[in-house]
Image (spheres, rainbow, N blue to C red):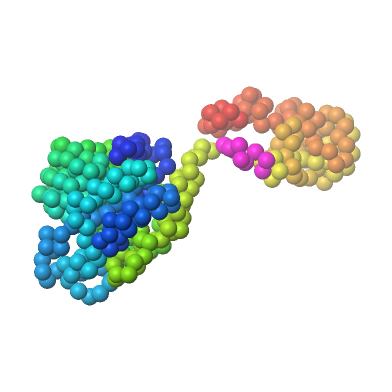
Amino acid sequence: MNHTAEIGSTVVSDIRAPIVIAEAGQCMEGSVEKAAEMATRAAAAGAWGFKVQLLHPEWIAAPDARRYWEHGDDVDQREVFRRNGLVPYPAWAAVAEHCAEIGIEFLGTPFDTAAVATLGSISRVIKVASGDINNVRLLDAVRETGCAVILSTGASTFREIRWAVDRLAEHAGPVALLACSLEYPTPPARAALGRIETLRDLFPGLVVGYSDHTEGVWAAGPAVAHGARILEKHYSIGGARNVPDHEMAVDDLGLYDYVQGAEQAWAGGGIGYLNLHDGEKPAARGARRSWYATAHIPKGAVIQPDDVIPLRPHDVDGARVDVDLAGWKATKPILAGTVVRQDAVKHPSAGRSPSARQALDDGDVDSATRSLLGRFGR
């Protein structure tokens, strides 16, 4: 099945290269100007989307809510969000407009219904964080926008994901799922890339991607190989404040490498048929072998084991090397050092030369092999 959905301005599917979202988080440190610069640099690195977070500390966490991530100072969540720097919700419109001008999709993660309303008016795509997968008020507000929704599923059960998808599907635009390991940062052993295939199997009608909380760029290729068609990666250009995301995010070069890794992994998985492709044709001749005569073989002579040797390169008219010519009879003289051609030998009892094409035509293969050879034109 081809998993496909229209996400913002793009049709995302199994037959197209995956898209990469640069997750800026709060790495712009409260500066709209820096956010615009980050979007410009993310677009230059090849990212499809630029994502931010819209939040008010008092509307996201209780006063004593401790941080659950590794990086940064050991203070409560509200204090971390304040220190990171906050952008007033209306100010994001200018960043969204800038993204439209430079050709990168603007999207955001809302952490309250006011943030949802803002994004619904300036963006075509809304990302829902894993932690809000069961937040009924937030999901109801998101679905009423009609935007496409990308839903992260870290630390979630199948029942929770199913409920959220059904809730959003009532009114929202297309829904895509991101497999995720909700651990900051995520060590490779707990990257949970296998969840991508699980989600693809359980939700065959939805596009599935991966929200990457690992460090470095290594996960892009494996995620795509597992079936991810949307990738989200934390991105930063650095800053003066102790924003936790700075430490686990990739920089410009890292983002470029990440995008390249994703696209190359997708391209590399395109050939699945069992027959040579155009790039293999030179090697198919140069690395395969044909029978060569080690000495002059007169017409009518019975070929002895030492009379022939399998050598490179393969000759299309040469006798097959998967058949030992010892005991076969020469039907014409064969000069030393030359290829033993198919029409120069015959089996003493069968009376035919070991040509692959002839083997197929004469039925000298089992029915299953015949079917496959016929299918691939061999």
Q: Position of residue 30 (x, y in %)?
A: 25, 61
Tell me the residue at 86%/34% (across/down): 334
Q: Verify whether residue 179 appears in magenta.
A: no
Tell me the residue at 32%/37% (across/down): 9
Q: Position of residue 343 (x, y in %)?
A: 78, 28
Q: Is residue 110 above or below residue 350?
A: below
Tell me the residue at 30%/60% (across/down): 28
Q: Is residue 318 above or below residue 308?
A: above
Image quadrant holding the C terminus, namely top right
From this viewpoint, which residue is outermost toward the bottom? 74
Dominant SS in magenta: helix
Q: Quadrant of residue 56?
A: bottom left
Tell me the residue at 12%/50% (across/down): 113
Front residue (pair 180, 371):
180
Where are the magenta residues, as a range? Answer: 275-283
Image quadrant holding the N terminus, namely top left
Note whether residue 289 is visible: no
Q: Is residue 288 left or right of residue 336?
A: left
Q: Quadrant of residue 23?
A: bottom left
Front residue (pair 322, 225):
225
Q: Is residue 250 above or below residue 342?
A: below
Front residue (pair 247, 306):
247
Q: Position of residue 350 (x, y in %)?
A: 72, 28
Q: Quadrant of residue 216?
A: bottom left
